[in-house]
Image (cartoon, grey):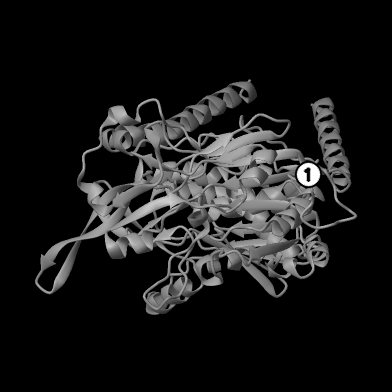
Amino acid sequence: MMENKKSNLKVLLTTIAILVVLNFAGNFFFKRFDLTADNRYTLSETSLNIIKEVKEPLYVDVFLEGNFPGEFKKLQTETQQLLEEFKAYNSNIIFQFVNPLENEDEREAVMQSFYERGLTPLNVTLDEKGKQTQEVVFPWAVVTYGNKSTKVPLLKNMLGASTAEKVVSSVQHLEYAFANGFNTITKTKEKKIAIIKGNGELDDRSIADFLKTVRENYYIGPFTLDSVAKDAGNTLKALKKYDLAVIAKPTEAFTDQEKQVLDQFIMNGGKTLWLVDQVNMEMDSLMETGENLAYPRDLNLNDMFFKYGVRIKPDLVKDLQAIPISLATGQQGSATQYSQFPWLYSPAVYSESKHPIVSNLDALKFEFTNPIEVLKNDIKKTVLLSSTKLSKAVGTPVEINLNIVAEKPDFKEFTGKGNLPVAVLMEGKFHSVYENRLLPFKESSFTPIGKENKMIIVSDGDVVKNQLDKNYQPLELGYDKWTNNLYANKEFMMNCVNYLLDDNGLINIRSKEVDLPILDKEKVTEDYTFSQIITVGVPIVILAVFGLVFTFLRKRKYSK
């Protein structure tokens, strides 16, 4: 008996010693193990590098708290586990879950303040054993660092998707959403973006939401090419100080001198985002007149794009997968009645590409877009967005009439003519359009072959254009006030900018895929009692059996 006590004491002391050594070693060596098949909780190197720079307390207020359906509970759990992972690597990250509507007396005031901050709530139906109630959910987080703060969307918008599908897509982007938020408020601005002016581009009010969003991470400034005629050399020198040039829907032709400035900006490593319409056709004027003539627009850029490796055709894309438009169809009393019709010249563009810019992106709204022909040269080209297989190119000039909404499309006309590229990424060493040609103006630093570079060409300038409300104030980019739908234009535009300027690999986190199992609500409802027995009863029975067996064996051992 004495030997047994000494043996037990020895084991106890040995165990305590091992625990003390492991605990002491844990202060110097840190390792977390992710046992999930999809490495859901393994943070990327990019995320780790971002949170390493957090030297002061960084506060995360998550508003996903309250009484809501199981899908949102899943999103809440995944958000909490991800934030715990961030906190494990940097204790300066402090988070809490808050129910903003906990106090019923302040409900209306709180909701109004959230609306003003752009934290739009979501109305969801809570269904419990056939009883339905309406709940308001705020799928947002606010990150604060010092005197700076930014909002983080937790739920991705997806047209026509179920809540469960939205949650799965959102969980895949949680790490990117938080890493991007942390990066926005902790990293000082470095890169500069030039918004090119002087050739009839979109005015600031039409791209206000884009400018407002970009300003959070980058310096931006208007850059007019008017001064090229007077002093082309100094204009080029000034443009070279920028990292990215955004050319948003020019309507006037570029001079050869202006083209040389842009060309040499590209040859010297400047990134470019081209949003170009090759056909003159505007929806606003069409809605006023009911019919209009669409005809080619000459911007004097064809030779430039051809040299780089693409050609924007002066055609219009007509797609059976179209965005609806609202048209007046009658009068009821003193109020005009509106109905929605699919507008085939406004494709709803989805991407099947796995490229980080468009991976898991929702539908984008395009309007009078043009097909892009990809040419063969040494430049690497990635088609980011295309029309559907049930689309076709319509040559111009052509008369467009609103009455075509009443026509029944012939599927045979569209078969085998679709998948037309409308956004292309190009990467590599571009050759100057003026290589082996006479220069429009003398330039001692002229470079015929550029550095490693990248550019994105989108054959629709309206993709960056936001609508205006009744007071002529800018609405969120991608929001259609006529149909009350929100499209992914803003996310796409920001992904383009981030990819072109991203030097820390943040955009690549978007490619992360998560396999998130979601309960089938219908099956659970059908077999509610059986589900309860499996999820609640069986574990209790197993625990009870284990307890009885353990007690029986213990009694038998010590009763001898």
Q: Amino acid at mark 1?
A: Arg
- Where residue 301 sits: x, y (%)? 62, 49
Q: Position of residue 221 (x, y in %)?
A: 69, 69
Q: Image point 74% across, 66% down: which residue?
A: 228
What percent of the width, then of the height, locates residue 164? 41, 43
The residue shown at (37%, 32%) is 390
Q: Is residue 211 above or below residue 27?
A: below
Q: Residue furthest front?
A: 438
State the residue at coordinates (72%, 51%): 271
Can you see residue 437?
A: yes
x then y, percent, for residue 429: 78, 39
For this view, does 264 lie left or right of residue 223?
A: right
**Mark 1 residue crowding within 10 angstroms, few (<14) / some (14–19) / many (20+):** few
- State whether residue 513 appears in this view: no
Q: Is residue 449 above or below residue 115?
A: above
Looking at the image, which residue sits at the far left? 333
In terms of depth relative to the viewer, which is nearer, 110 or 483?
A: 483
27 to the left or right of 60: right
Position of residue 315 in the picture relative to residue 342 (left or right): right
Q: Quadrant of residue 7?
A: top right
Total residue callouts = 1
**The C terminus - image quarter:** top right
Give above or below for 315 relative to 137: above
What's the residue at 48%, 60% (across, down)?
Answer: 65
Locate the N terminus and report the quarter of the image it occupies: top right
Q: Is residue 261 above or below residue 82?
A: below
Provide the secondary structure element on which disc 1 rests.
loop
The residue indicated by pointer 1 is 437
Front residue (pair 376, 543):
376
